[in-house]
Amino acid sequence: MADERERKRLYLEARAAEVAADNADIQAHLEELEQLLQSTLEVDDHIDFTRLRKRVQHPPFNPGQLAQPIPGPDWRRFEPPAPTGLGKMFGGQSKYQQQLAAARTQFLQAQGQHAAAEADRQRRLAAAYQQYQQHCQRVDAEAAAQNAEIDRFAAAFAAGEPQAVVDYFGMVLANSVYPDDFPQQYRLAYVPESRQLVAEYELPALDVVPAVKEHRYVKTRDEITSTARPAKDVRERYTSVVTQVTLRTVHELFEADRTRLVDTVVFNGVVDTTDPRTGQAVRPCLVTLRTTRDQFTPINLAKVDPAACLQHLSASVSKRPEELAPVRPVLEFDMVDKRFIDEVDVLADLDERPNLLRLNPYEFESLIQNLFAKMGLDTKQTRASRDGGVDCVAYDPRPIFGGKVVIQAKRYKNTVDVSAVRDLFGTLQNEGASKGILVTTSGYGPTSYEFASGKPIELIDGANLLYLLAEHAQLQARIDASELE
């Protein structure tokens, strides 16, 4: 009976310990989610190329027993004892001489065997040393090749080559340590004209927040029960995850950029999941943000409320992220990615795609009118501008969301100055329009994005324009300033 009671006591303790461990795991995971932003602030996200270089230190050559010469034969082990006493008197001397001759023969044979063995040892020692040298040479060559590749990568990054910039910031995001159930999938694109880095980052799904609030062991039924986490708590915690990941990623990108190749970061946080209402795969954007270095870096992230901070930065965050309610990205990733991923390595005169910079003002005006007509706007009035661009007043026929739209297009080679954005805003107010769109064949600087932030203005650069022409007007175009030189 005592043994049975002890067994039951130990069983109950084991069940209670199991519940306690499960509850501890839930609490630890919740604390991880609460510290997503804070946990990265003390980490230096910059990648030092010099630390990636491989430094080789070869161990000393250690041949083991081969380094020890083989001891030669010792004559004393072969030499027969000399006759003494009566043995010396009764023919012992003759027998001794016979033994001595045989011993000398054996000794000579042993010397020969030793010489052969020692020569073999030296050959094997030389072969081992040659292998050691060859191994060192291979390691040195591998290190030299790796270091040369790192040097080439560092030079390409310093020169602002888009692919090198994308690869570098991809390494930065890959180094970021998240909980195991975070997908950490992303796409990056770099627009050198506007020094803009675009990140499409995959957010975790709603199930990253534990659905169970607490486990309990019911002794009378010998079962473990679970208390569901309130829907409000799940929603608030998931929104916190979305906002923290957004600020964390933008922080890591700006902090890692010691050479200041990036002036503006666009972040689109998407979820790759299944719509529970339809069972179809969906990829809604739950948060989108465009911010400049000057706007973002003065923020003390250690003390902010993530949601309030994103509101301050004019980010768009889903009102119901737990229901996968999407927001419209400030910039579609593919609008940037198309231009730089699809490289064209052919001579300009062999490329049949029209070069937008070679169009005359009338052709450019017709192109812009046709594009926005294809996109559903009713263009009513256009006039050519003195800077080679086109001004267009159009109408969005949609109820509630529609209205008058002012469109200005700049056929530029160089970055559009912020004054053009200010002029558009003035025109928008003068026309009583609900929205302004500025299109250029080049790009924009950070001051332009800062001015447009929070205003009903959309900035479309050259990469965006090429994408829109391909998607809506079925026109494959290009922008090549070298043809004008």
Image (cartoon, rainbow, N blue to C red):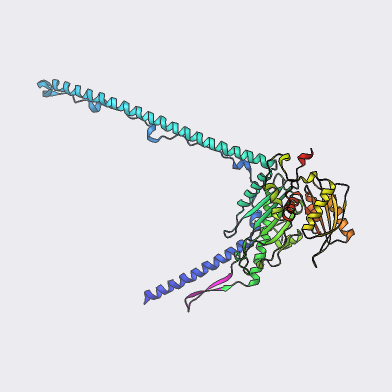
Q: Can see residue 297?
A: no
Q: Can see residue 134?
A: yes
Query: What residue is at 89 percent from the left and 59 percent from the top?
Result: 431
Span highlighted in magenta in the image: 210-226
Q: Reply yes or no: does residue 354 show up in magenta.
A: no
Q: Quadrant of residue 432?
A: bottom right
In this rendered view, identify the residue nearer to me: 446 or 365.
365
Rendered location of residue 375, percent (x, y): 77, 58
Query: What residue is at 50 percent from the left and 33 percent from the top?
Result: 137
Q: Quadrant of residue 111?
A: top left
Residue 94 in the figure: left or right of residue 27 = left
**On the rendered image, what quadrant is the N terminus found in?**
bottom left
Rendered location of residue 206, percent (x, y): 62, 65
Residue 342 in the figure: left or right of residue 451 = left
Relative to 160, residue 177 above or below: below
Q: Residue furthest left?
A: 90
In this rendered view, identify the residue nearer to me: 143 or 381.
381
Query: What residue is at 43 percent from the left and 73 percent from the top?
Result: 9
Q: Reply yes or no: does residue 216 show up in magenta.
A: yes
Relative to 250, residue 47 above or below: above
Residue 121 in the figure: left or right of residue 471 = left
Q: Residue furthest right?
A: 430
Rendered location of residue 270, percent (x, y): 66, 60
Relative to 159, residue 378 above or below: below
User: How many numbered badges does the structure rendering display?
Assistant: 0
**On the rendered image, what quadrant is the C terminus found in?**
top right
